[in-house]
Amino acid sequence: MAILRLLAIRLFTTLVTLSGVAVIVFFVIRVVPGNPIAMMLPPGATDEDIARLSALYGLDQPLVTQFGIWVAGVVQGDFGTSITTRQPVLDLVLGRLPATLELSIMALVMAVILGGAAALTGTRFRGGRTEGAIDVANGMALSVPDFLWGLVLILLFGVLLPLFHISGRVTPSLELPFTTDFYLFESLIRLRFDLWADIVSHMFMPALALAIPLAAIIGQLLKQSLKETMNLDYVTLARTKGYGETRVILREALRNAALPTLTLVGVQFTFLIGGTVIIERLFSYEGLGNMAIDAVINRDLPLIQGIVLLFALIFTVVNLIVDLLYAVLNPRLRHA
Amino acid sequence: MTFLSIRNLSVRLKKGPPLLRRVSLDVAAGEVRGLVGESGAGKSMIGKAVLGILPPSVEVTGGEILLDGTDLLRLPPAERRRRIGATCALIPQDPLTALNPSHRIGPQITDRLVDILGWTRADATARARDLLAEVQIPDPDRVLRAYPHELSGGMRQRILIASAFAAEPKLIVADEPTTALDVTVQKQILKLIAGMQARHGTALLFVTHDLGVVSKVCQRLSVLYSGMVVEDSSVTDFFAAPRHAYSAALLAATPKYTDPAAGLLPVPDAVIDAVRAEVAAHDRGAA
Ligand SMILES: Nc1ncnc2c1ncn2[C@@H]1O[C@H](COP(=O)(O)OP(=O)(O)O)[C@@H](O)[C@H]1O
Ligand SMILES: [Mg+2]
């Protein structure tokens, strides 16, 4: 029941949020100088040409009218047509979404594994040199932003020790049997491990660059939380039962300590998704973020609007998932 | 037969002042020993030393903790843990914080039986059900599936008592097991522990600051002041004629159930000064 209520409330707030985002993005990108039509036409086009094309895209109408037309379309699932490619925005965006989702989720998994391992190891050997080393590594990981990690990784694994692909999503010469755009998942399901390995090799560095700062945050916060939990009475009681340190950390402390970390990871994960914009550009990874930068450069207004709305939707869905997970993991909330 | 024998145990804050000063005490099989003293005297520290849960901020500087003849302090950590887990148990002070909020009650009672003692899950669950019935919890099956937050403090303390007796330990350390409870529940819990102890024949190290409780459940007692045992007597002897001036003053400061209105005497300054001098003399001797 509590979960249904949460869903209902969230659905409503999501609609409000998305409406707000729609208004802001629509008007802001029209205030910023730069004319999409001028960008499309070859140099030397006449004012007449510009006016004709503007009328074609409805850009000669008053702003409010344009907004009304756009919103009416969006409500019916029509996000307009990309000015540069003349394809429906929805098709373009949905075509790129899987690439970005796969990259983000891969990065999240890497961050949870790296950060979790750092926190658990630091807790297991707390107060010693191991913990000190982990703290130093965490601090370094945090003090460098993801795109700089991207450059570092390119130098390391693309140039010095070329282990991974540095650009694209998949080797272009490969024959792809996929029916969806979720290449990573589909290659697994089709048991095409050759393709899967190629895709992972392309994703590895961008995903790791995105993961490193988040891993550091998870590592620090979870370790702090674990160390506090390790002093609680129920952990002490478990020790008297004959359990060793590792077992006590994993079974008694981890779950309770993970709860406060989880909420923060949700927020940080939305930052990570935001980070895909630059990282995808850096690694020429064909996802939403890369498309967003092209759209901005070309002043492709309908496409920008579509991408921003989609990002906003992703953020709210991520937050919802975090809240649901929190409720599932915390028995006190589950029965409330 | 002595099950627990603490010999000259000294514990101090790491690079700091002593917390336990050559503490010696025995608990015979099936015996109940009270451990009394004012707050901060080191009662819990003794219990923690026995159970191998001393905080990392303190260190043992000398002495022995013989469990069934084996010195725990000389055992490798894993062996020490296993031995303590198999033969000892703790009834903690605060039932509200001593159960893991993320686990159901059932596994928190059966975990030691299954993981440390190798019982089957079914046997362990059956045992847990019996124990819950023994500590007078209605509807044990529902409680086994419940989470701690669904239960009252009194219920949780009953569960912790059941859990402590689960593996039929030789020794239970009860660290002020009623202090955190409602006054109305305190007496029931005390009776419950005493009854369980008698039925199971478990040795009990009963930490309390309440001499009234000692007179009801203990056979022997140790009086602790500033980490030093100042008196070790049978309960009968102690209440007839305490040997140490400090414990006599402590007894005089305890409200009598027969006559609660009778004047409570604070521990006189002269007595405090004398016992402090003893502690100081001890520290000079140790240095
Ligand atoms: N975790 C700890 N770290 C350092 N000192 C402690 C710790 N726990 C207790 N002490 C100190 O040890 C002494 C004995 O404490 P304790 O055994 O808890 O007393 P009590 O007789 O009230 O149970 C006190 O002076 C207390 O301040
Ligand atoms: Mg205490």
Image: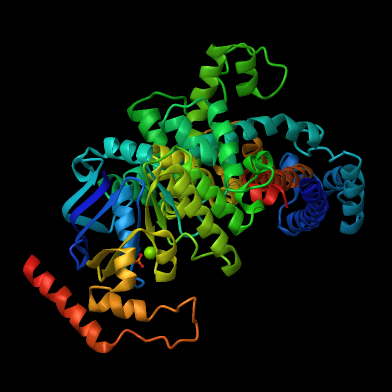
Q: At 58% from the left edge and 11% from the top edge, which residue is drawn?
A: A192
Left or right for A263, reference A317: left
Q: Nearer the viewer, residue A81 or A266?
A: A266
* Residue A306 in view here: yes
* Residue B95 in view here: no
Q: Nearer the viewer, residue A140 or A152?
A: A140
Q: At 38% from the left edge and 24% from the top edge, which residue is drawn?
A: A162
| Ligand 1 quadrant assignment | bottom left
Q: At 32% from the left edge and 72% from the top edge, which residue is drawn?
A: B240
Image coordinates of residue A149 in percent, x first then y, are 43, 42
Colour theme: rainbow
In the displayed structure, A305 sits above or below B39; it is above
Image coordinates of residue B36 in percent, x first then y, are 34, 67
Left or right for A73, reference B233: right
Image quadrant where residue A328 sits:
top right
Image coordinates of residue B263 in percent, x first then y, are 43, 88
In the displayed structure, A143 sits above or below B223; it is above
